[in-house]
Image (cartoon, coloured by chain):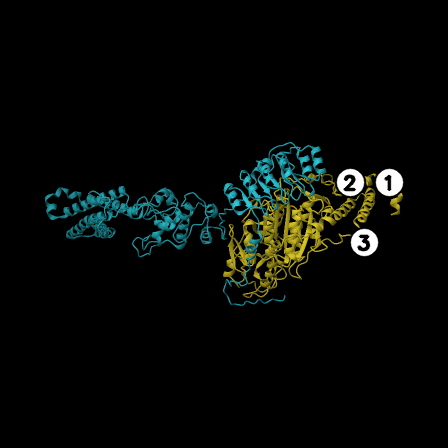
């Protein structure tokens, strides 16, 4: 018999009858077992059996075995079975049917008389039949339930003896406990256990319903007979989810009616996994999880408190260039120059003992003039990383001086009279990561020039003349730049609309008044 | 007096005269005597303390924060009603606190006599906000707006169970008084940027009368030189007591008086060699400079109206937390290194529900406004802001538990504080408590750890900022403290 691929739609009748194979198959099993038992007992003179009885039983075995083969063929048309295993089982079934027929023939009076020399083969034949029965039945069971079905729950120490790998812990009733929920791999630790317990019984290497295997990530994503079951990023359009959402009475609903169903939590997790890219390697912390998912995930966490960390997309501030430069070696500022700066009212603040880089602050010299600043800047101080000129009398006249501070990472120019003209000079500072121009005359023209500052990480433009549009453009050009434009008078209203709730939610909805008696000691 | 003059011989007189003329010369610079006086009179850290590594007041490592604004909530805010959402308390409302949770934790005398310890869930509704999904109650609407700037630590713990030892502990590192406060350590270790303002300023406010008192030892200098004590600023026309010249005394007269006073004092120093004499002189000089700098700094008349709106209506009223927050910002702008605010009134042993709302109303908006204000001025990158009390409050009700009111007793085992700004992670939640909000289950942070972290952010290794006194080396973190690395950006 050639096994036909189910390339054309199979008649429903065939499929209907095919489903009876697991039922019908128990007839030859029962009867063959019975015959063997009876014949054995008769052989050892324990009982006496009428040969007519044995003959009838063998006939029934043969017929039912043959019938099972036919029905089995119908079942195979459904598809979704491992080809190799199916062929073996089929062949074994056929052999069994033939052997049963032979056994029956041997009991016919005509045969017994005419070919009496073969009678001695009768008992060996029964034994062979039994053996074939075992093999056929076992393979049939594998086709239905999977190869590891029998040995799955073998207790120790037998597991070790037979080299059976340790039992997979997941059962359908409890969720697997994960110690470090945030570092758990979403697919391996959360999704796969769901699939394993609810889907893999029918979608595994031995049994591939709908030509779909779900035991392997690639094959899961590949899909089966009807194509892909996972649409990356779109859980609503994924067949996997669609089928779970179908009413249980619907034929296409998965898992099939009567089998363990997918719980609501598991469904949410599957949807969450698909919507976030259906990846095989991303960790829990790398996916964005809302409250609902967090609550579900927390049930997986073995720590007894909510601990799922958010996949925060907030980028922490890191002044990387500054950190790198500070760790470099450089000569200290000349003592004479130091005195000069201090005398002029500047404060020299070394960053640390291990570093000769400094901050220079004029917080004590609000009267600092362009002339004084120029005088000091002549020294070309590459040790200066932070320069605080806020609230001084510095103006555009000093703009050419900034190039003397080649390593500058932070520049404070708030509340000074600089204009767009100075931005040209500032834009030359390759290492600048922080620029504060709050309350200056900077406008859109100046802002445009900042677009070339690739290293800039923080820009403060509150109370300047820059426009929203220009800020948006700059943001687009320099995606790593955080621009802080501050609260405008108009936006204050928005800030102020925060109101505490006057009424409690009465979250526990109790009307009980509990009183406490103080016990006087 | 007479004796001193008699002991002076001619050469001494000449010396004094020399000093005088030097002083007069230097007095011509805009800094006045300040800089030179400091330089010549301040006992250098190296000389006074050869084992202190902060020589010349330079940090150990590059600091992230250049100044600290500490918003200390005195009385202990109830974290269970503000920051730590515990649905288990709702589930078990009214039931006794299980012994398995309490584990024999000592109770204060105020609740030890109770026959029952009924669990009190927060009356207020909680929800999660921001990228960090931090739980905040609905009485902190302004915190909800700035939650992404904040780094919450929910697992702070202390040993102290009552206010005085606890505030002393968090300020000085020991439950017994007498040690320098955090601000003093910072002032001594790192010095100050602004020569015309003290490096350690204290601002006090209270929302409810009759709450836990505060003492000057909390911002005292302990055994450190007295120039490092916290200077209390009051907002209003007279920010510092006795700072201004009395009527009829001109600035010139004051200057002459100070000059002569310094002459006398340096004289005495030579005889007695008590460094406190010089410290006293330094403080006089500082006061002199403050006569001009303080009114200028604290002048809020020039603030635009919408800034006042941002901090809240109370910010126009001197002595409120809102007004102090605004001042704190102004002081930070001027480079004051350690600005300590205290806000009293959080001690809700009873009547928590209405009382805590009085507190949050006075604190929520100004705290948020301060963060936003610092941020828009570009100051949040190098200013560290800390907000929190001295311990937490407990899960069971003190006194009668009704559905709309209850009280909470002290709870040192866990509570929440937040930090923001220089060097700490934004939008971050660290540490966890158990389902009852009673014990810490993850990442405990002891007071000493907190102090070590604050010092670390200022560039100071807390184990190396030490002062030898009475035979042993003291430090802010006493003999403990680990920097909490996971919250560092």
Q: How would you rate the neighbour count of disc 3 (Cα within 10 Å): few for under 14, some for 14-19, many for 20 or more?
A: few
On the image, the x and y values in percent for residue B383 come to 62, 46
Foreground label between 3 and 1: 3
Secondary structure beneath dot 2 equals: helix
Distance from disc 2 to disc 3, alpha carbons, whole Å, reads 27 Å
Labelled pair 3, 1 in contact (Cβ < 8 Å): no
Q: Which mark is residue B202?
A: none
Q: Which mark is residue B26?
A: 2
On the image, the x and y values in percent for residue B416 come to 58, 53
Distance from disc 2 to disc 1, alpha carbons, whole Å, reads 20 Å
Q: Is residue B358 left or right of residue A290?
A: right
Q: Is residue B295 left or right of residue A276?
A: right
Labelled pair 2, 1 in contact (Cβ < 8 Å): no
Chain ID, yellow in image? B
Residue placed most toward the observer, B274 or B356: B356
* Chain A rendering hue: cyan
Question: Which mark is first along the chain, 3 or 2?
Answer: 2
Foreground label between 2 and 1: 2
Q: How would you rate the neighbour count of disc 2 (Cα within 10 Å): few for under 14, some for 14-19, many for 20 or more?
A: some
Badge 1 is on which residue?
B13
Badge 3 is on which residue?
B248
């Amino acid at each position: 018999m050639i096994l036909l691929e189910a390339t054309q739609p199979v008649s429903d009748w065939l499929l209907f009858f095919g489903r009876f194979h697991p039922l019908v198959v128990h007839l030859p099993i029962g009867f063959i077992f019975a015959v063997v038992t009876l014949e054995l007992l008769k052989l050892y003179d324990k009982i006496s059996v009428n040969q007519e009885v044995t003959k009838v039983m063998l006939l029934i075995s043969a017929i039912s075995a043959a019938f099972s083969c036919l029905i089995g063929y119908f079942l195979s048309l459904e598809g979704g079975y491992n080809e190799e295993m199916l062929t073996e089982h089929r062949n074994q079934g056929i052999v069994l049917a033939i052997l049963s027929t032979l056994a029956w023939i041997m009991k016919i009076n005509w045969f017994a008389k005419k070919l009496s020399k073969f009678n001695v083969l009768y008992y060996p034949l029964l034994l062979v039949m039994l053996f074939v029965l075992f093999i056929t039945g076992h393979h049939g069971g594998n086709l239905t339930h999977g190869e590891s079905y029998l040995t799955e729950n073998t207790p120790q120490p037998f597991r070790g003896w037979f080299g059976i790998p340790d039992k997979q812990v997941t059962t359908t009733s409890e969720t697997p406990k994960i110690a470090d929920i945030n570092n758990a791999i979403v697919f391996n630790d959360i999704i796969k256990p769901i699939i394993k317990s609810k889907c893999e019984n029918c979608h595994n290497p031995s049994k591939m319903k709908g030509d779909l295997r779900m035991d392997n990530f690639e094959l899961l994503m590949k899909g089966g007979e009807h194509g892909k079951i996972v649409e990356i990023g779109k859980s609503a359009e994924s067949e996997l989810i669609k089928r779970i959402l179908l009413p249980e009475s619907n034929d296409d609903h998965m898992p099939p009616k009567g089998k363990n169903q997918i719980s609501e939590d598991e469904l949410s997790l599957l949807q969450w996994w698909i919507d976030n890219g259906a990846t095989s390697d991303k960790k829990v912390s790398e996916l964005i999880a809302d409250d609902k998912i967090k609550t579900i995930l927390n049930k997986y966490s073995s720590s007894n408190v909510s601990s799922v960390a958010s996949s925060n997309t907030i980028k922490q501030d890191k002044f990387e260039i500054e950190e790198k430069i500070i760790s470099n070696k450089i000569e200290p500022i000349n003592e004479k120059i130091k005195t000069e700066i201090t005398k002029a009212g500047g404060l020299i603040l070394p960053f640390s003992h291990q570093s000769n880089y400094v901050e220079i602050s004029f917080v004590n010299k609000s009267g600092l003039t362009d002339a004084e600043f120029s005088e000091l800047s002549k020294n070309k101080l590459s040790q200066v990383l932070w320069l605080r000129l806020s609230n001084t009398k510095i103006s555009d006249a000093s703009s050419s001086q900034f190039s003397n501070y080649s390593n500058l990472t932070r520049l404070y120019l708030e509340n000074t009279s600089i204009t767009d003209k100075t931005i040209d000079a500032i834009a030359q500072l390759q290492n600048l990561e922080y620029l504060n121009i709050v309350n200056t005359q900077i406008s859109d023209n100046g802002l445009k020039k900042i677009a070339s500052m690739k290293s800039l990480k923080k820009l403060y433009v509150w109370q300047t003349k820059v426009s929203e549009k220009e800020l948006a453009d700059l943001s687009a050009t320099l995606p790593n730049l955080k621009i802080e434009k501050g609260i405008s008078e108009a936006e204050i209203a928005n800030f102020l609309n925060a109101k505490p709730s006057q009424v409690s939610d009465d979250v526990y909805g109790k009307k009980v008044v509990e009183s406490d008696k103080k016990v006087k000691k | 007096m007479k004796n001193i003059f008699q002991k002076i011989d001619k050469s001494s007189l000449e010396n004094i005269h020399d000093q005088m003329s030097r002083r007069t010369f230097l007095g011509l610079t805009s800094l006045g005597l300040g800089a030179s006086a400091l330089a010549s009179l301040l006992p250098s850290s190296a000389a006074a303390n050869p084992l202190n590594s902060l020589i010349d007041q330079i940090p150990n490592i590059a600091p992230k924060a250049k100044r600290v604004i500490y918003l200390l909530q005195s009385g202990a805010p109830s974290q269970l009603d503000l920051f730590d959402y515990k649905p288990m308390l709702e589930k078990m409302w009214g039931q006794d606190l299980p012994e398995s949770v309490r584990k024999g934790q000592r109770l204060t005398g105020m609740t030890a006599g109770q026959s029952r310890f009924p669990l009190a869930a927060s009356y207020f509704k909680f929800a999660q906000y921001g990228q960090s999904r931090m739980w905040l109650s609905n009485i902190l609407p302004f915190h909800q707006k700035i939650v992404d700037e904040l780094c919450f630590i929910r697992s702070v713990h202390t040993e102290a169970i009552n206010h005085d030892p606890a505030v002393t502990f968090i300020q000085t590192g020991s439950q017994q008084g007498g040690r320098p406060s955090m601000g003093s350590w910072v002032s001594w270790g790192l010095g100050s940027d602004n020569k015309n303002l003290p490096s350690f300023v204290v601002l006090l406010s209270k929302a409810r009368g009759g709450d836990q008192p505060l003492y000057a030892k909390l911002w005292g200098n302990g055994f450190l030189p007295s120039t490092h004590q916290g200077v209390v600023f009051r907002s209003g026309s007279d920010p510092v007591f006795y700072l201004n010249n009395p009527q009829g005394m001109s600035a010139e007269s004051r200057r002459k008086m100070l000059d002569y006073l310094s002459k006398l004092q340096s004289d005495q120093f030579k005889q007695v060699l008590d460094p406190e004499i010089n410290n006293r002189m330094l403080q006089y000089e500082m006061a002199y400079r403050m006569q001009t700098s303080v009114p200028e700094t604290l002048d809020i008349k020039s603030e635009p109206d919408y800034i006042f709106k941002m901090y809240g209506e109370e910010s126009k009223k001197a002595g409120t937390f809102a007004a102090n927050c605004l001042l704190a910002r102004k002081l930070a702008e001027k480079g004051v290194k350690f600005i300590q605010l205290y806000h009293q009134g959080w001690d809700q042993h009873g009547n928590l529900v209405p009382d805590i709302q009085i507190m949050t109303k006075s604190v929520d908006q100004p705290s948020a406004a301060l963060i936003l204000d610092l941020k828009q001025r570009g100051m949040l990158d190098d200013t560290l802001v800390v907000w929190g009390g001295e311990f937490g409050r407990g899960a069971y009700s003190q006194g009668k538990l009704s559905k709309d009111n209850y009280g909470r007793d002290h709870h040192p085992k866990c509570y929440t504080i937040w930090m923001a700004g220089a060097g700490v992670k934004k939008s971050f939640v660290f540490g966890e408590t158990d389902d009852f909000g009673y014990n810490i289950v993850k990442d405990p942070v002891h007071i000493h750890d907190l102090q070590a972290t604050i010092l670390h952010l200022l560039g100071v290794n807390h184990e190396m900022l030490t002062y030898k006194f009475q035979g042993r080396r003291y430090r802010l973190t006493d003999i403990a403290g680990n920097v909490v690395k996971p919250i560092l950006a």
